[in-house]
Amino acid sequence: MSVVKAQKKPSGVWLFLSFLVAAVSIYGIMQVFTHGQEESYGISREVPWGILIIGYSFLVGISAGAAIIGSLAHVFKVSVFHVMSKRVALVSLASLVGAFFLIFWELAGPFELQSLRLLKYYSQLEFTSPIWWMATLYVLELPLLALEIYFLLSKKPNASFFAALVGFFMGIIAYSTLAFVFASNATRPLWNTTSFSLTFLISATAAGAAVVLLILFMSGKGGKLKKETDALSKTLFLGLCVIFFINAWNILMYTYSNVDTELGATMKLFIGNGILSNNFYYMELIVGIFLPLLFLLVGKFHSSFLSALAGLFMLIGMFFHRYDNIIGGQLLSRPSTQMDFVQHTYHVSTTELSLFIGGLGVAGIVYFLGEKLFNLEEEEMHA
């Protein structure tokens, strides 16, 4: 057993920057208080889910991915993934808190008593509602993640094992339930597929590896821990390959399907000169998949810098993938009295954008505050 000490990072500076980023949300909060959501957000009756829902699914995906990577060390005892285990658990918790910030401003206006709405919501016990289960699971996961961090800091391996085990299953079930919220909607054919939920889980695992690679590089450990960097880079590489082939086969299937269907018409938004084609080609495929794969191959899975860069680009691509799929699933409709499709529009408002940026800042505050307050510098690993 050996102990590796990381270089001390100026967490105070990062914490200050996180507060500045979170402060951007003040503009959006004031707009919502002054004008209300309907006027402040870019959503509409036809496109009711905008960037706040997208940001929520993005952050809980990072949370689930970090929980999966962390469980490989604490639950399955894969020693190579034990590196940065405390920070990985903290990333999972911080991402979930940031996601809760976004969903708070998405679900209802600030003038409503959220606690009373929550009590009424749970008193009805809507067991058949995917959204009810998704919300319940995430409410349960938050204290579980906090407990896991506490046990890790207290050096209680048995307790942290069971906390990580429950958190592992809770994270997968909760995130797949979120995907099911979309996939169960039969009126949205882009979502109503088994591959939608599968892609969510695979991208979450890849995102977990990407986040750990970024932490390794930022902490200064990446250059020393070649074996760990290699394992995480290969995990990211495998996840990216699977995501690429799922997308490739979906495109082929949709291309050769009947374009007169709503699904075929929806796919036209992504290919050719469709309204989402630039996002799909440049941000999803090139930035989110091809460049990360190239960086990993050039670095031969050993370069801490190139692997971290691949992880960063993958996360950017993952965000645009969430954006395109959630928005793309809402842009088309066909009234029952018409044969032609009606294409709707969605533009991110400055209010929504400021709240989304603020949510990232909130996640940063939780993470860097934990890094500043707790001893995360020493990680035990098997030699």
Image (cartoon, rainbow, N blue to C red):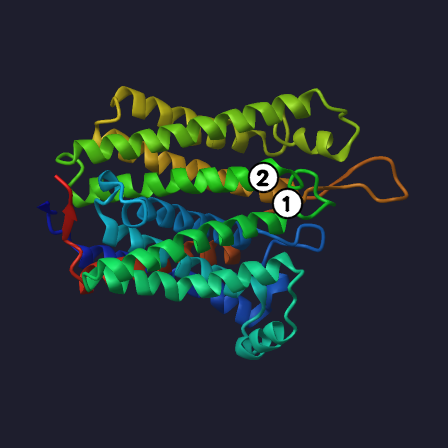
* Mark 1 neighbour class, 10 Å CA radius: few under 14, some 14 to 19, many 20 or more: many
Quadrant of the drawing holding the N terminus:
top left
Q: Is residue 270 above or below residue 201?
A: above
Quadrant of the drawing holding the C terminus:
top left
Secondary element under disc 2, as helix, strand or loop, is helix
The numbered dot on residue 150 is none
Residue situated in front as seen by the camera: 108 or 69: 69
What residue is at 39 percent from the left and 56 percent from the top?
A: 167
What residue is at 61 percent from the left and 38 percent from the top?
A: 194
Residue situated in front as seen by the camera: 249 or 288: 249
Q: Is residue 319 above or below residue 164?
A: above
Question: Position of 369 compared to 207: left or right?
Answer: left
What amino acid is at disc 1? Ala
**Earlier sequence position, callout 1 versus callout 2:** 1
What amino acid is at disc 2? Phe
Question: Position of 6 compared to 371: left or right?
Answer: left
Furthest toward the right, the residue is 337
Furthest toward the front, the residue is 158
* Mark 2 neighbour class, 10 Å CA radius: few under 14, some 14 to 19, many 20 or more: some
* Residue named by callout 2: 196
Question: Mark 2 and mark 1 in contact (Cβ < 8 Å)?
Answer: yes
Q: Position of residue 341 (x, y in %)?
A: 79, 37
* Residue named by callout 1: 183
Q: Position of residue 282 (x, y in %)?
A: 48, 28
The image shows a total of numbered marks equal to: 2
Secondary element under disc 1, as helix, strand or loop, is helix
Snapshot quadrant of residue 124: bottom right
Q: Is residue 222 above or below residue 28?
A: above
Question: Position of 260 compared to 188: left or right?
Answer: right
